[in-house]
Amino acid sequence: MRSRTVLTAFLPALFATPLTGQPRPAQPRPAVAVDTALYAGLTYRMIGPFRGGRSTAVTGVAGQPHLYYMGSTGGGVWKTEDAGTRWTNISDGFFGGSIGAIDVADSDPNVIYVGTGSADIRGNSSQGRGVWKSTDAGRSWSFAGLPESGAIRRLAIHPTNPDVAWLAALGHPFGRNPERGVFRTKDGGKTWDKVLFLNDSTGASDVVVNPANPRILYAAMWRAERKPWTMISGSREGGVYKSTDGGDTWSKLGGGLPTGLTGKIGLTVSPANPDRLWAIIEAEPEGGVYRSDDAGKTWTRTNSENSLRQRAWYYTRIEADPQDDNTVYALNTGLYRSVDGGKTFSSIEVPHGDTHDLWINPANPRLMVLGDDGGAVLSPTHGRSWSSMDAQP
C-alpha cells in the first residue's frame, strides 16, 4: 500500500507549475483560417466493401429476365435491372432493417409486397415492423399494416388479383404475442384478417397457393421462440394445414406426416402438377422431405438425409421447379436439387453457403435468384454459374 500512496501523492505534481504548485493553465490554440472554397467541390462516394450481407428473401419478374429483388436482414430492399451487375437500395427513406419476404404480383409487376423481419431466427435477429407495399415497382412505398407481426417468412399474392394476398407471420421471435399465424388481405393491404391462428406462441413458417386454383392453400405452423441461451422449436399443434376456400377455414393434414412434436416446416406446390407438393419437416425421428401426389391427402417420406434439415430453425426451405414436377430444390448449408421427385438430392455449387430463399423464373427455369448469407446471386444457367456477390454495398 505504501507504493500506491506515494504514487497518488506524486501524480498532481506532474501537472503543477514549478513555482506555485498550481495546475498549469491550458494554452490557447491559435485560430486557423480555412478557405471553405477549397472543399466546395467535394462529395462523398462509397468505395466499398461491395459485399452483400445475409439475405432470406428474393424474387424476380417472369417477363423481365434481368429484373430481381433482394431483401437483406439488415439493409432493406434492393433491386437489380441488369441481372446482378449493379444493385440499388429502393427502400431507404421509407423503411429498412430486416426483410423476411418479398412477392411481386404476377398480374401486375408494379405491385410488390414486402414483409419485414426474417423468420430464420438467429440469436442476433432483428424484429420486423409489418408489411410495406409499392404500386410503382419500388419507386415509392406505403405502410400496409401488421406492425407486431414480428417476422414474416412468406408472402403469396393471388395469381390474377393483386389486391388479394396471404402471408405467414411467425410473430415476435423473442416472446409470445397474438399477431401471428396466416393473414389475408382482400383490399390491397388496407386491412388484414387473421385466418389461421392456433395460440400466442405458434406462428406460421410458410404459406403457399395452388397456382391452378388459388382457393386451395397450404400453411405450415411452427411454435418457435428465441432465448439468449437456447432456441425453442416445436409443438404438438404445429404441422401442415390446408384450406379449400381461400383461407376461410383450415384443417390439419395427416395421412403419413409426422405426429407428436413438430418443428419448422417448409412447403412448395409443383406448378407443373398442382396435386403434387412437398414438405420439409423438422421432427425426430420422422423428419425429412415428404411428398404428396393427391393434394395433401396422403404423404410419403422420400428423403431423411440430415444434410437437408440440419440446424432446422435457420433453414428449412423447399422450392419446386415450375415446369418439371420431378425437380425440387432444398435449401440448407448448401443448395440441393432432386430430379427424381425428392428421393435423392445432389449439391449445386454456389458462391456462398447458408442458402435461405430461391426464386425460379416460371417462364424459363434456367433463370433463378438465390438468397444466402452472402447476399443475392443470379444464375442464367440452371445453377451451373452465378453472378458475383460483390455487387451489393
Image (cartoon, rainbow, N blue to C red):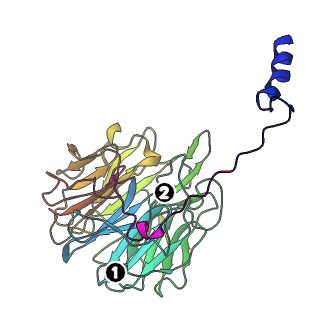
Specify whether residue 296 is in view: no
The secondary element bearing badge 2 is classed as loop
- Amino acid tagged 1: Ala
Residue drawn at x 61%, y 68% is: 148
Instruction: Provide the major secondary structure of the magenta segment.
Output: loop
Indicate which disc residue 119 carries: 2
Q: Is residue 387 left or right of residue 108?
A: left
Look at mark 1 in the image and give the residue it sits on.
137
Q: Is residue 1 left or right of residue 216?
A: right
**x, y (%) of residue 322?**
21, 66
Q: Is residue 45 magenta?
A: yes
| Mark 1 vs 2: CB contact within 8 A | no
**x, y (%) of residue 57?**
38, 62
**x, y (%) of residue 195?**
54, 74
Disc 1 versus disc 2: distance between alpha carbons?
Answer: 25 Å
Q: Which residues are magenta?
A: 28-53
Tell me which corner region of the image, top left, top right, bottom left or bottom right, holds residue 209.
bottom left
Q: Is residue 305 magenta?
A: no
Q: Is residue 129 above or below residue 21?
A: below
